[in-house]
Image (cartoon, rainbow, N blue to C red):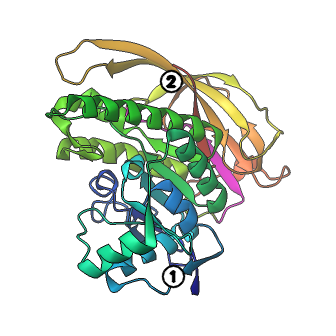
Amino acid sequence: MASVPVSNSDGSGGIVLTDSPDVIDSIGRPGLLASRSGEPVRVMVEPSVRSDVLVQRLGGGAVDIPPDVPVGAAAWLDAATASGIATAKVAAISLAAELADSVYRHRHSGVLFQVGDGDEPDAETERWLRERCEAVGPIDEDLTAANLARVVGVLGDTRLVVYNLSTYVPDGDDIDAAIAFGDRAQRLDLALATVAGEHSMVVVDADRIVAELGAGEHVIAPGRYSAEAASDISEEAVAQVDALGVLDPMASELSLLVIPRYDRRTTAGSITRWHKSAGDAVDPGDLLFDIAFGGLASRLGATKDVKMSNRVMTLGVVAAEAGHILHIAPTAEVSVGDRVAVIGVRPDLDPGTTDELTPHFRVGLRVMER
């Protein structure tokens, strides 16, 4: 039985996208991310796999590949055991992968793999699946959340971007199945929101975006949306990636803390509380400040013919790296992109030396109150 290392594909310094339709149709459009930092950025595409297979793919050790793998199944095993995600700057995946019902485990080696959508195994491969493998049933939202937390732990400096799912299901004959899917998608989205608040990951809220547009007109299938919806999702996803700052040159010892963008509606708000003061040290995960965005229009139904409501949302800005706060700007009313603090790697740096080339201090966002 051959052993192969995992996570050794070449994604160094670039962006890795999984080939889920919601990811590829939005942020994966040709050329969209290729030069976000002003210099060419390598963009790779990998097969989308369920989170339990992704954990195996990023395991960091070796995976025993069974010697009896037929030619027709080789690509499935490759997708389950090699990835460039761990060496990329940004990786984008989708909760749509959690809907996969074609995950198998090799009985002897224990290796998990996923049959590609639309693949039609030949007779030899079908016999191998039947005799040497066993189907692995759906996983629940708690295991998905645990798997995503493990993925973040393995990735280290790689920033994980996760697309959630629209809970709307297009009209069909099987009403019970549609209701069951909507319930499951909602549970997955809630689990993702919870784990994202506890770990350093970014959520692209596809569910909210298509609901605002009118989900009944823009959801084609689970994880697949209209061109208009994909464009709006892309706008938010790109803003999220830009806010991370990981594609900017990080040569300076000084960073600017700017107001990050949560989504395309949160453009101006008020800082309601600072949790840090000038001179304080900052560790990854520390809450830096709270910002309230008001007057957010929310479309609550699946079509455009619904009433709008205004909401206030408070977000916590969370440090994604260590540093020292050298200066805090005395301002409360702010807009996305405003500079509100200077952070340095050492407490003795002069904050007055910042310039336009200073990189942004990396942060995450946590929903504190809606």
In this picture, which residue range is highlighted in magenta?
251-264
Identify the residue at image location x=30%, y=58%: 24
In the picture provided, is 330 more to the left or to the right than 122?
Answer: right
* Residue type beneath disc 2: Gly
Task: Reply above or below: 110 against 238.
Answer: below
- Is any atom of residue 331 visible in this view? yes
- To which residue does mark 1 refer? 66
Crowd class of label 2 (few under 14; some 14 to 19; many from 20; radius 10 Å): many
Element marked by disc 2? strand
C-alpha separation, residue under disc 2 versus residue under disc 1: 56 Å
> For numbered disc 1, what is the local secondary structure?
loop
Using residue 283 as the reference point, say whether residue 367 is left or right of it.
left
Q: Is residue 66 above or below residue 306?
A: below
Q: Work out whether mark 2 precedes mark 1 in sequence or the reverse, and give the earlier one.
A: 1
> Looking at this view, is 125 or 220 the one in front?
125
Q: Position of residue 71 (x, y in %)?
A: 34, 85
From the top left corner, tell me how far across and down residue 79 is, in percent.
43, 72
Quarter-of-image position of residue 74: bottom left
Q: How many circles with numbers are drawn on the protein?
A: 2
Q: Main secondary structure of the magenta part?
A: loop
Query: Which residue is the site of mark 2?
Result: 269
Q: Nearer the viewer, residue 36 or 115?
A: 115
Question: What number is the disc on residue 139?
Answer: none
